[in-house]
Amino acid sequence: MFRKISLSLAVAAVTTLCFAKTPPPPTLEVGTCLSGYTHFNTIQDAVNAAPAGATILVCPGTYPEQVTITEALTLKGVTLATASGARIVPPEAGVVQNATSLSPSVAPYAAQVLIENAKNVTLTNLTVDGTNDLIQGCSPYLIGVLFQNASGALSEMAVVNQILGPGLTGCQGGLAVLVQSGGGGTSKVDVADSVVQNFAKNGITGSEVGTKLTVERTSVVGIGLTPYVAQNGVEFGFGATGSITDSTVADVAYTLPEVAASVGILLVGSPSVTVKNNVVTDTETGIYTYSEGTDGSASGATITNNEISSTHTWDGIALCSNNNTVTGNSISASDESGVFVGGFCLEPNGAASGTGNKIKNNVINRACAGLMFSFGAVPGANTAASNSFFNTDTTVLVADSCPAVAPLAALAVNVGGGGGGGSRLQVSPVR
């Protein structure tokens, strides 16, 4: 026997199933500047209560806490006409370790904001200020915002004052923003329209295989000439990929350049990074690609249409890798060369650096040498064409340094890294 089913009832049931609405993720509030939301006194309390996908609005004020985020969230500062904004600062007792590096160093980390094992985490319109962190030694590493095996975005942020105690020299902590992957995990982070300023070691760092870092329209400003450590403005390291565009990097310089160079934009063991339309000024080297042997290749970079000025001690652009494209850059006031090509770094396959680079249509004004080729990186192994030179001592020089700066022997004494033997220009990356 067959049972008849009403067609209209069946259609209604299907329609109800298809069009049932999922309620949107809630919005929570930290502080009491708004109405209509659930209120929390601290950011961490709101984060703990929020379901995945929620938005947390942070009222203007000062929040002395370390924040850990482990699921998709939007953390957004509220703008009020007469208020100073939302500011995350160290707790009264100081910043303490809350993470460990995913790199081979396994260094202890003390992050003001830690995002781990989460996707789609967005921070916007917040200041993360490291003043009074109370870290007294080189360990743990102070970090403003740390993404570990996590993805998301920082937009319209200010990450400032990740500075260590007075007198601490050579410490690798004091990082404003670090994006790091490890153990097969991945991190994809976009930093845009933000300010990073007054950091001890690095401004923005993307590190390890699995990391993709994008930096756009962001200002990165170091502490200027310092005896404490070789700063880097933006670093892509050890397999990280990505790009930096339309940004400004300034004021990173070390008083001991013969030991290690501060670099505006450093690509160390990270391939195929795009560096485009940036302003880099008052550094020891403006942009540097450095293949690190078995730790990764920095070849295949695209370095185009950047304005690089006032590189003290060293070069506007230094290439210690292969097959890079350097075009349309304006380079002025370099103590050494406008573009240096070195042959002392090693690719993972054991090949030496300094070949296959295309250096075209750059304008170089005031340098000891417009182009300098060293350690077997002879001009014939690279393509250099249609570059314009003004007020240079020489246009093309096959040497390791300009004689007026220092003799070759003094600059090539066992300060090289990357397995390539002696180098005139040693970098100091974070790992």
Image: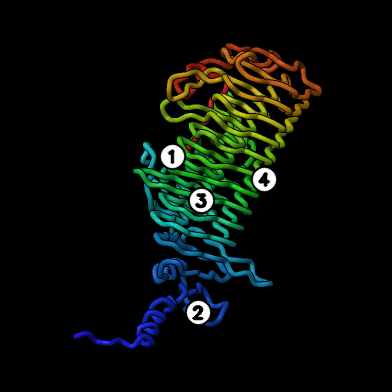
Q: Amino acid at mark 4?
A: Asp
- For the rendered model, the colour scheme is rainbow
Report the number of discs: 4
Residue 356 shows in this picture: yes
Q: Position of residue 102 (x, y in %)?
A: 38, 43
Label 2 vs label 4: CA separation?
Answer: 38 Å
Q: Secondary structure at mark 2?
A: loop
Q: Label 3, on which residue?
A: 189
Residue depicted at 64% across the width and 25% down the height: 358
Label 1 vs label 3: CA separation?
Answer: 13 Å
Foreground tag (2 vs 4): 4
Q: Residues within 10 Å of mark 3 (few under 14, many from 20)?
A: many
Pointer 1 or 2: first along the chain: 2
Q: Secondary structure at mark 4?
A: loop
Residue depicted at 72% across the width and 21% down the height: 385
Pointer 3 or 4: first along the chain: 3
Pointer 1 or 3: first along the chain: 3
Label 3 vs label 4: CA separation?
Answer: 17 Å
Label 4 vs label 1: CA separation?
Answer: 24 Å
Q: Label 2, on which residue?
A: 37
Q: Label 4, on which residue?
A: 246
Pointer 4 or 1: first along the chain: 1
Q: Residues within 10 Å of mark 1 (few under 14, many from 20)?
A: many
Can you say whether 228 is above or below 247 in the image?
A: above
Residue 94 shows in this picture: no
Q: Amino acid at mark 3?
A: Val
Location of residue 22 by image quarter: bottom left
Q: Residues within 10 Å of mark 2 (few under 14, many from 20)?
A: some
Can you say whether 225 is above or below 151 in the image?
A: above
Can you say whether 391 is above or below 249 in the image?
A: above
